[in-house]
Image (cartoon, rainbow, N blue to C red):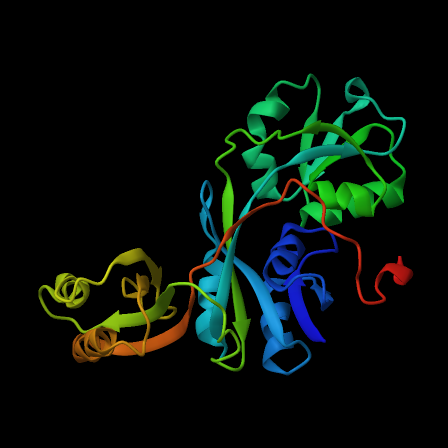
Amino acid sequence: MVVVAFQGELGAFSEAAARAYFGNGIDLSPSATFREVFLKVSNGEADRGVIPIENSLAGSVHENYDLLLEHNLHIVGEVKLRIVHHLVANKGVALPDVRRVFSHPQALAQCQEFLRGLSGVTPVPVYDTAGAAKELKASGMLDAAAISSAQAAMDYELEILASGIESNHQNFTRFLIVALDPDAGSGRPGNKKVSVAFALRHAPGTLFKSIGVFALRDIDLLKIESRPIPGTPWQYLFYLDFAGDVEEPRVGKALDHLGELTSFLRVLGCYPIGDTIDSATPFARERAGQDSER
């Protein structure tokens, strides 16, 4: 059985992404931090890792871009999850009773219009949406609520006070699947994309030329992101996603051309473009023995 590591408690959106990608026949490995996810996959404790890389409202998860370069893992897949937030509370709590709302800072920010409409309520940031639900249940608080997934509400036997409370319903998170084996995602259907990281040599027009190697070959660029290089002020690494397969001759030529312009180039992965899944509906609860640990 495939062991899949993700950041957060059971019921986190990252678990939903893992379920959406792999189905229910997996062994889950909840992790406290993103770094722990990478370490588990690197040392063989987990077969795959699931990490969020960007949100359509909040932008990129920069820590995970940095971790991709720190570890010798490969991107082997992706899945996009529509994020639906719910206000959940212990049984017997009504909306007027709520004085504090716990959740991850991004979830609180994504629901700020709803929270502003609640009188006398203080948002309280915590490390994880599902963790907020878990702690709320354990505390038994009757004057507090959490923002979490519907799955977390079901897992921790909480009542949903309000659904779809995100300010913008076009709220999607893209998750990457990482593995030690670059071919771990092979065999899945769909058009492919390639993710690379590179640093440019210092010369006039190098950034323009680096983008041009793809335009010359009619290769569609999907995303570009820059990150500072630690210890070298005002120098940057670029992360680039483009449509194609490294087995295609034109892609190979584009990468060779890019290599001539760069001081560093690494292919992070070649993998099928992911599907978009809705997180509003809880999934089946077959956890390969983990249910008995609750």
Q: Quadrant of residue 270?
A: bottom left
* Residue at screen point 60% across, 40% down: 107
Q: How many marks?
A: 0
Position above or below: 266 against 90: below
Residue 51 pos. (x, y %): 56, 61
Point out residue 277 in the picture as x, y percentages from the top left corner.
Answer: 56, 48
Residue 67 in sight here: no
Residue pictured at 87% horizontal, 34% vertical: 141
The answer to whether residue 158 shows anywhere in this view is yes
Above/below status of 120 relative to 147: above
Please give the name of the residue rendered at 83% of the width and 37% of the height, measured from the top-left corner: 158
Q: Quadrant of residue 95?
A: top right
Across and down, in percent, residue 282 comes to 72, 45
Q: Residue furthest left?
A: 204
Quarter of the N terminus within the rendering? bottom right
Q: Which residue occupies the foreground of this view, 194 or 231? A: 194
Q: In x, y percent, where is residue 161? A: 76, 27
Using residue 91 as the reference point, say whether residue 84 is left or right of it: left
Query: Along the horizontal axis of the image, is 83 left or right of 284?
Result: left
Which quarter shows the C terminus? bottom right
Q: Nearer the viewer, residue 162 or 234?
A: 162
Say left or right for 103 vs 167: right
Residue depicted at x 62% and y 44%: 279
Residue 148 found in image quarter: top right
